[in-house]
C-alpha cells in the first residue's frame, strides 16, 4: 500500500439531513474542526500499527468545510470557514508524520472555496487569503510549540463531536534555514487575546513581520461590492515578546534569523 486515500468533509456531508446554522456554537464547532481530523488520523494509525505493524501514509485527496448538499451551489464564504480551514491546515502540520499529501475539494464556487466567480467578477474569499498565507510562509520543518490560554466548551455539530475546554489559541510553528514562522489562530470571535511568546533556540532580528487575516465577526465575507472586507494585512513591529491577536483571526509572525 502506497497511500490510504481519505475524503473528509467537516462538519459532514449528509445530503438530506445536514443542517449548519449561524450560531456561535456552530461557529466554534467549525473553528475546532481540525481536532476531529487529527483524531481520525490517530485512529487510523493506531489500527495500522496494531494490524500491520507499520505506519500507513495518508493522502487526504478530498477535504473541505462542507455540510448540506446545497452548498455545492451556494458555497460557504465567510471568515468562519477561513478559521476552520486554518485549523485543518494545523492538523495536517501536527500529523505530518503520516499525512503526506492533501488536496482541497472545490477551488471554485462550491463547499468553502477560495474563489467565487460570476459572469462579470471574481471574488477572493477569506479562505483564499488563508491558503495563500500558509502556502507562502509554511516552513520545511515543524517545531515544537506549546500554548496555555483560555478555553471554551464546544457543542457537537453533525460529525463534529462535543468538546470541553477547546483552547482559544491554536499554534503551529515552522522553521526554514533563515526564518521562523509562528502561525496563531484566535478562535475567540468576540475578544482579542493578548499573549506572551517565548522563543528558544532561534536568534532573530528586528523588526518582525506580522501577517494578519482578521474580520469583524465570523459572518464577515467578501463580495463584488466589498472584495477586500477580509484580506491579509502586513505590518512590521519591533519585537517585545508580547502580541495581541485580534478576535476571529489568523496571524503569521515571521522572524528572520539574525546573522
Image: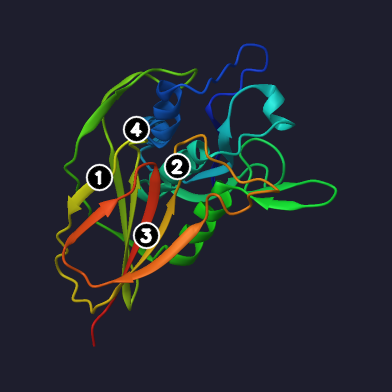
Q: Secondary structure at mark 3?
A: strand
> In which quadrant will I find the N terminus?
top right
Helix, strand, or loop for circle 4? Answer: helix
Front label number (1 vs 2)? 2
Which comes before the other along the chain, label 3 or label 4? 4
Residue 194 position within the rendered picture, expressed as x and y whole percent measured from the top left: 21, 49
Q: Nearer the viewer, mark 2 or mark 4?
A: 2
Query: Can you tell which mark lies on residue 118?
Result: none
Closer to viewer: mark 4 or mark 1: 1
- Whichever of callouts 2 and 4 sits on the residue coming sooner in the sequence is 4
Q: CA distance from mark 2 to mark 3?
A: 19 Å
Q: CA distance from mark 2 to mark 4?
A: 41 Å
Q: Which mark is residue 193?
A: 1
Alpha carbon distance from label 4 to label 1: 35 Å
Kind of element beneath mark 1: strand
Say whether disc 2 or disc 3 marks the residue closer to the N-terminus.
2
Q: Badge 3 is on which residue?
A: 252
Q: Which residue is mark 4?
A: 46
Closest to the camera, between mark 3 and mark 4, is: 3
The disc, 1 or 2, on the residue closer to the chain's N-terminal end is 1
Q: Residue at x 37, y 59 (%)?
A: 252
Q: Position of residue 244 (x, y in %)?
A: 25, 53
Q: Residues within 10 Å of mark 4 (few under 14, many from 20)?
A: some
The mark nearer the N terminus, 4 or 1, is 4
Q: Nearer the viewer, mark 1 or mark 3?
A: 1
Q: Position of residue 64 (x, y in %)?
A: 57, 38
Vertical position of residue 125 compared to residue 240: above or below = above
Amino acid at each position: 500500500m502506497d497511500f490510504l486515500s481519505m475524503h473528509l468533509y467537516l462538519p459532514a456531508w449528509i445530503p438530506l439531513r445536514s443542517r449548519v446554522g449561524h450560531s456561535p456554537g456552530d461557529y466554534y464547532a467549525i473553528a475546532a474542526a481540525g481536532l476531529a481530523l487529527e483524531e481520525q488520523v490517530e485512529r487510523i494509525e493506531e489500527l495500522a500499527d496494531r494490524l500491520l505493524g507499520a505506519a500507513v501514509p495518508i493522502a487526504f485527496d478530498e477535504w473541505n468545510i462542507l455540510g448540506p448538499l446545497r452548498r455545492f451551489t451556494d458555497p460557504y464564504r465567510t471568515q468562519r470557514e477561513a478559521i476552520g480551514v486554518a485549523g485543518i491546515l494545523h492538523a495536517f502540520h501536527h500529523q505530518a508524520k503520516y499525512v503526506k499529501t492533501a488536496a482541497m475539494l472545490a477551488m471554485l464556487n462550491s463547499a468553502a472555496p477560495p474563489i467565487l466567480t460570476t459572469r462579470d467578477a471574481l471574488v477572493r474569499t477569506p479562505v483564499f487569503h488563508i491558503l495563500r498565507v500558509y502556502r507562502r510562509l509554511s516552513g520545511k520543518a515543524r517545531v515544537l510549540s506549546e500554548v496555555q490560554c483560555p478555553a471554551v466548551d464546544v457543542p457537537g455539530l453533525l460529525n463534529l463531536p462535543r468538546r470541553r475546554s477547546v483552547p482559544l489559541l491554536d499554534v503551529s510553528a515552522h522553521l526554514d534555514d533563515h526564518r521562523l514562522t509562528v502561525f496563531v489562530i484566535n478562535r475567540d470571535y468576540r475578544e482579542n487575546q493578548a499573549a506572551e511568546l517565548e522563543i528558544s533556540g532561534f536568534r532573530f532580528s528586528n523588526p518582525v513581520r506580522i501577517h494578519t487575516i482578521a474580520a469583524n465577526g465570523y459572518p464577515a465575507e467578501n463580495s463584488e461590492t466589498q472584495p477586500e472586507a477580509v484580506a491579509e494585512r502586513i505590518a512590521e513591529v519591533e519585537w517585545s515578546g508580547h502580541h495581541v491577536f485580534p478576535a476571529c483571526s489568523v496571524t503569521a509572525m515571521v522572524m528572520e534569523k539574525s546573522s
